[in-house]
Image (spheres, helix red, strand yellow):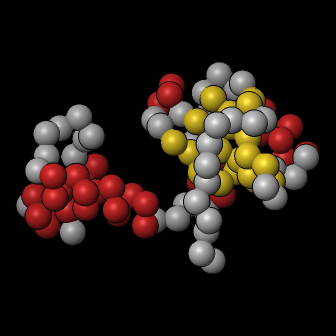
Amino acid sequence: MIAQLLDIKNEEEITDNEVLPLEIRQLKKYKRRAIALSNDTLYDRLSLAQKFSASRLNQYGFKLRFIRGKGLRTLAIFECKDNVATIDSSGEVQISPNIKLRMNPT
């Protein structure tokens, strides 16, 4: 849809740094959130340090829910029952971050 509005062939040509009309930025944000990635795809996006720390969290029942950020500024968010943990791009784990997760309707 965004590609049709901007008349381009590849949506990847659009970067977040470009100045886009507000409507286009909102559509891009909506589309990004509407696509649920598989767990394998999420793990592929983690740095090596994050993967190492994630394996330790998995032993305690934590599951990777989503990743925020890009490149060297990624934050992986894990959940286990009512507990939340994060892993920054250097692999540092925070067991009780100041994060509120929205309930998943499914």
Left or right of 11 on screen, residue 56: right
The residue positioned farthest toward the right in the image shown: 59
Which percent across, then down, holds residue 27? 25, 61
At x 14% / y 67%, what residue is drawn? 4
Which percent across, then down, holds residue 8? 13, 57
Quadrant containing the C terminus is bottom right
Which percent across, then down, holds residue 86? 68, 37
At x 13% / y 39%, what residue is drawn? 19
At x 91% / y 46%, what residue is drawn? 60
Left or right of 39 on screen, residue 9: left
At x 79% / y 55%, what residue is drawn? 82
1 up-or-down from 69: above or below: below
67 up-or-down from 40: above or below: above
Residue 105 visible (yes or no): yes
Left or right of 63 on screen, residue 39: left
Residue 10 visible (yes or no): no
Q: Nearer the viewer, residue 88 or 95?
A: 95
